[in-house]
Amino acid sequence: MKKISLLFVVSDTENSKNFLNIIFRLLDYETYSVSVLSLGDEYLPKNENVQIKDFSNSYLDSGFLKGFFKCIKDKKTSYIPILIKEKLTKTISKEDRINFVDLEGKYRACVSVDLNCGEFVADRVTSRLKIQRFPYGKVETPYLEDFEAFKKFNYFVVLDDAVKEPFAHAYEIPEEKIKLIPNIIDIPELKKSADETQIKREAKYVFTSLCRLASLSQIDFIIDTAKELIKRDFRDFVWHVVSGRSDIHPTKIKIEKEHLNRHIRFYEKQQNPYPFIKACDIYCQVSDIEAEAITLNQAILLSKKCLAVESEEVHTKGVLLSKKDPAEFAEKIIDMCQNWDNFPLITLDTGEEEFIKAYTTLFEKPKKKEENEEETIASDQQTVQ
């Protein structure tokens, strides 16, 4: 049985880890032979089926004489000065080392996971299909080097439909080459992160809000809602507010003046906010600028009941909504707490099946007639040992 060979090239490993962990977990390794090459920080895939490509096949590691004659044979004489420098100084930059990579083998499909890998994949990887991910929410001024590299790619993947047209226009790419495949949540990793820390329960009712992108006015909304709860003699609660801001000192002073220290707990720049979601009874989405309300979906996947401010970003069916009015928000919190069984948990489609099908459909697309149709798929496949 033959496997279809795939290569993923990544540079920005910190921001791409979530995507790689998910796709490596969902791929069928009876069908695919999968490798990953990191041009940036070291990336160690959690899946043992994924082969890690490194720079061990470079000209440099062949030894000086072998590397020298390999440069001559492969007509890469421009590498020789760097080869001599490495021989004399025993040091070489990672950038130069990347330039020496002799990536062996052909691949059925190669994915450039972030834009920093585009030129490398375009010029250095032998692959029948080349796919460039565009993992950003907006299109900045295009770079000239990307124009040349992008000509060698078959498909481009964007995460948001709103990016598709601007991306096509900025880089002069036919829209049929641009595929929309939104990110999904890595559920096993989410649950693992939520279990890392135990949050002490300090009241009968616990609420949590993640406000990583929130303005101070939105944090003020939580303060005003807490005051409305107390006004209605609903006092046995603690509200965990995880903020990504560093300028909330005035807000803390306001909490003290309003005598709300007992009820509102602020946590700044938490690397792992998910234990706070796990610890709550109701997740309160007060931010109206969180893209696709991701935190709301994370709370649902952690089996939490949710209350959200009405927003264009909240599309999840069944979520209880409130106008952005502290009094109404407080009333709905009380209603949920006092009539708990009237508000069942929401089930959410994980999106995993659709996500992996979208990518594997790209990987297995046939070549176009003008692209050397006489090559067979078998030539780009690896034989299972």
Image (cartoon, rainbow, N blue to C red):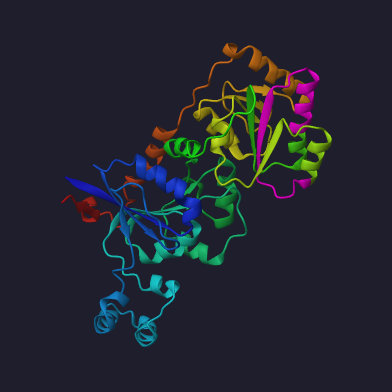
Is 199 rendered above or below residue 98? above
Q: Please state the total of marks drawn on the protein image.
A: 0
Q: For residue 234: magenta?
A: yes
Is 220 rendered above or below residue 335? below
Displayed quadrant of residue 260: top right
Q: For residue 214: magenta?
A: no
73 vs 272, left or right, is left
Displayed quadrant of residue 319: top right
Q: Nearer the viewer, residue 145 or 102?
A: 102
Question: x, y (%) of residue 24?
Answer: 36, 45
Q: Nearer the viewer, residue 101 or 345?
A: 345
Question: x, y (%) of residue 104?
Answer: 27, 65
Q: Nearer the viewer, residue 207 or 197?
A: 197
Q: Quadrant of the N terminus?
A: top left
Question: x, y (%) of residue 199?
Answer: 56, 34
130 vs 344, left or right, is left
Residue stretch in magenta: 222-249
Residue at 79% x, 30% y: name it.
224
Displayed quadrant of residue 227: top right
Report if residue 325 is visible in the image.
no
206 vs 113, left or right, is right
Is 212 rendered above or below residue 371? above
Residue at 45% x, 46% y: name it.
19
Question: x, y (%) of residue 86?
Answer: 37, 82
Report if residue 287 is visible in the image.
yes
